[in-house]
Image (cartoon, rainbow, N blue to C red):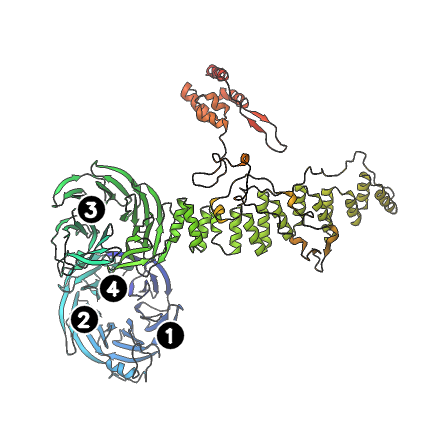
Amino acid sequence: MLTKFETKSHRVKGLVFHGTRPWILTSLHNGVIQLWDYRMCTLIDRYDEHDGPVRGIDFHSNQPLFVSGGDDYKIKVWNYKQKRCLFTLLGHLDYIRTTFFHKEYPWVVSCSDDQTIRIWNWQSRTCISVLTGHNHYVMCAQFHPTEDLVASASLDQTVRVWDISGLRKKTVAPGSSGPVDTFRNPGSGTELFGTSDVIVKHVLEGHDRGVNWVSFHSSLPLIISAADDRQIKMWRMNDAKAWEVDTCRGHYNNVCSTLFHPRQDLILSVSEDRSIRVWDMSKRSCIQTFRRESDRFWVVAAHPTLNVFAAGHDNGMLVFKLERERPAYTVHQNILYYVKDRFLRRYEIGTSKDAPVMAIHRSGAPQFRSSPHILSYNPAESAVLVCSNTTNAENAYYEIFPVPRNTDPSNPEFTEGKRSPGLTAVWLARNRFAILDKSHQLVIKNLRNEVTKKVQCPPCDRIFYAGTGHLLLKDAESVTLFDVQQRRSLNTVKISKVKYVVWSDDMSHVALLGRNTLAVCNRKLVAQCTVNENMRVKSAGWDENGVLIYTTSNHIKYALSNGDHGIIRTLDLPIYITAVKGSKVYCLDRECKTRVLSIDPTEYKFKLALINRKYDEVLHMVRTAKLVGQSIIAYLQQKGYPEVALHFVKDERTRFSLALECGNIEIALEAAKTLDDKVCWDRLASAALAQGNHQVVEMAYQRTKNFDRLSFLYVITGNMDKLRKMTKIAEIRKDVSSQYQNALFTGDVKERVKVLRAVGQESLAYLTAATHGLTEESEALAESLNSHLDKLPEVHPSAKLLRPIPPISQTESNWPLLNVSKGFFEGMTGKGPSGAGVMATIDPLDQPEDGGWGDDDELIINEDGEIVTDVGGEDMMEGEEGGGWDVDDDELELPPDLEPDLGAGGIGDEGYYVPPTKGTSPAQVWVNNSQLPGDHVRAGSYETAMRLLNDQLAVVNFEPFKALFMSAYSQSRTAITGIPLNPPLYGFPHRNCFSSMLILGKRFLELA
């Protein structure tokens, strides 16, 4: 039994699977109903409106409804989409045991300890029939899947089969077909002491104690019942009678629930003896038993279409499968060999030819006990190894079959194989295979199944093929590469619970698949990446590009060697990949049918080309493929390719952010003009200022009307004309502070006096005028001050004139940057320079004479108080689009002496330009190339110098060396004063002889 999911809660008394979703509904003894997702192992919702234990629950087949019945005598119908109870059905007088929906009609059948069975119309919310006849508690009542029958089980030791065809004819409207929701006289069939519309068709007697459960077979006229006499009885019926077929004995306590396996001739039962048992219908014998020592089982349920079961016990619920759904298969070149039913089949990938090769099981063999788990093919000797029950050491065995080279597909013959016990068997060489026996020892055998030798190997519980003479040994926490000839381990990688191993076609890489983890390793088992999944990893395969394509329960995904992974497409049902060819995925489903699925490999091919630096392929995909979405943009940003992401983005705000990230001021400027947002202009100004593109900074400040920063920009660029215009603008805006500050920047004393006088600071205005020698202004201010002051302010005799230093040269062009050629994508796509790495060289003569601002007499204030010009009628603060210019590096002709040196900092091996790298410091060269402690001291590497002294002279106390170290280090370099406010330039003089080192070494020896 394969456990899929387990919950811990109160005693589970009812279970039901949803027909189309991975949901299971449980009813608990504490009155709570829980809705679980058994694939994700999560609780979705809970309902707790019942006043006592809830026993009977059921999902509707096509409506978002479920029904529940509890010990509060109430039947409730719920809508799980609305997460609420729709209504309550009242009528039973005691505990309700089970409730079930009809497959077609809007009916609900319920049974109770009041010894009755009731059929309800949940649409009209009325009871349409009451079935009486049992004389004890009725424990279970169910509709037949297709016929007008109801089966009931009671503690009166009988099973009754009721014919409800009369009820259907009486209540269903004439002429209706299919699922019916139209009824006439819904309560007319009910009489005082029962109903004449429902009759007892069969009464099945044979149990010695009360019967707890009854269930119909889905297609055969069979009924199965479970009772407190510890027996399970199977009954057959026809129109005339019903009789007991056989009894299954083996439980040693009350049998609580039982059902037919929906796919195979098996019976499942649960009991208070703490066991789940599987019975063979044909032999009526127990073939497997699963026990829990601490929990009694109360109910068992089966999924209507999938191979999934659930059992409720004292402390929760267990969801499980009885058999593996993964088919056994192997691929050699373009040939797929797989086992379906009892045949080994051959499928040609590409031509889709599928034919049986031979029968490997005799007709009628129990499929449940002999389903193969592993298939391994030997093309040299045309033989296959089939391993079964690898998860159960007691029943594990392998078989070796010779594969006939010529066979009749229409009549494949049975081939007798050689069977032996063993956990796993894989081919090791042309005529040898390895077996891991039950004692976990490695045994080598030949084609005649004879032991040739035994090999001591590290402890393991499974082996995998790893090339001729090599095996992968898997234990609980790791996988080891083992050389069988040399009998030694070559390497080990830590990954827990590996279940499958998938090699690439050239055996250069291997994928190790665990339950929720996969690892990609190279041929020497060195891990390259690990991917963790929330869902179980089902299968994997390699495509021709070396990309791992793998599947989970719901998706086909990819994984690259650097750890990148993503979703290719979703799946309705799990599949198992056999091969990947281009955009086609060849696979097997759970029904062991070959399928071909189409995928779009563009995304992972694009990422692979980026990883391998195949930029021509990247560019081709950029131009032709439809790579859109935030995931690819985020990937390119994460990997450092924002300039490539620009080609996929249509949203201007995203383009703006990407352009700033890759330093492309031109595209950022275009996006900012489109967005016209203050925050964007501020960000653009900061980025452009960092690159020295002060023309874009000027435009951004103009757009945001950031006058203070604009004035400072003109100060540092020496643009005095525009500073004077800023003074005029401040005067018009009545911004006295900015007006005075701009007057300080320009050295305009008259303007400063004017501002101070206008704001009432006549004393400061007089001092300013008198200090700077403005006689007329000072006399006028003195007359004004004499009228209300007794004494004029005195001018300090040592006062200095507050005038700024005039700029040496006005900077019209952007600040020079390192000259680096365009990147690959910019050069091929014709985009502009990408920012900080490109030098801008605008000719100042090309600029407009007015600088883009106009003359002072053109300044006009509009009605809103904003500054405009009469040139074109446009807002002056909008500025001009200028500030940048287009110089296509591809068309720029340089003199021969200015051509880039391709040997240093030029074009690299990948075909694109890279900036020159920073050179190695001479001090670092001394450390790298010298074993003399003095060299290390002069380089400032005291730690390595002390280590050398310890190794060469055994010095352990370095305190006496401190002064000598500091003196030697201070003499090792020269400092040259550079530009003010910048650090000095260091020079490292080199010795032309060993005299200085000998002297220093002598002093070291003296101290030692």
Which residue occupies the foreground of this view, 211 or 219? 219
Q: Measure the C-alpha gap from mark 4 to mark 2.
A: 20 Å
Q: Measure the C-alpha gap from mark 1 to mark 3.
A: 61 Å
Q: Within 10 Å of the Cα at label 3, are there few (<14), some (14-19), or many (20+) other Cα atoms?
A: many
Q: Which label number is shown at residue 220? A: 2
- For badge 1, the amino acid type reads Phe
Report which residue position mark 4 lands on: 300
- For badge 4, the amino acid type reads Val
The reply to whether dot 2 and dot 1 touch (C-beta < 8 Å) is no
Q: Is residue 813 left or right of residue 613?
A: right
**Is residue 758 at least partly visible in the picture?**
yes
Sequence-wise, the earlier of marks 2 and 1 is 1
Q: Within 10 Å of the Cα at label 1, are there few (<14), some (14-19), or many (20+) other Cα atoms?
A: few
Q: Measure the C-alpha gap from mark 3 to mark 2.
A: 42 Å
Q: Is residue 25 above or below residue 806?
A: below
Which residue occupies the foreground of this view, 522 or 47? 522
- For badge 3, the amino acid type reads Val
Q: Measure the C-alpha gap from mark 2 to mark 1.
A: 36 Å
Report which residue position mark 1 lands on: 87
**Is residue 565 at least partly visible in the picture?**
no
Sequence-wise, the earlier of marks 1 and 3 is 1
Q: Is residue 975 left or right of residue 865?
A: left
Q: Is residue 201 above or below residue 368?
A: below
Report which residue position mark 3 lands on: 426
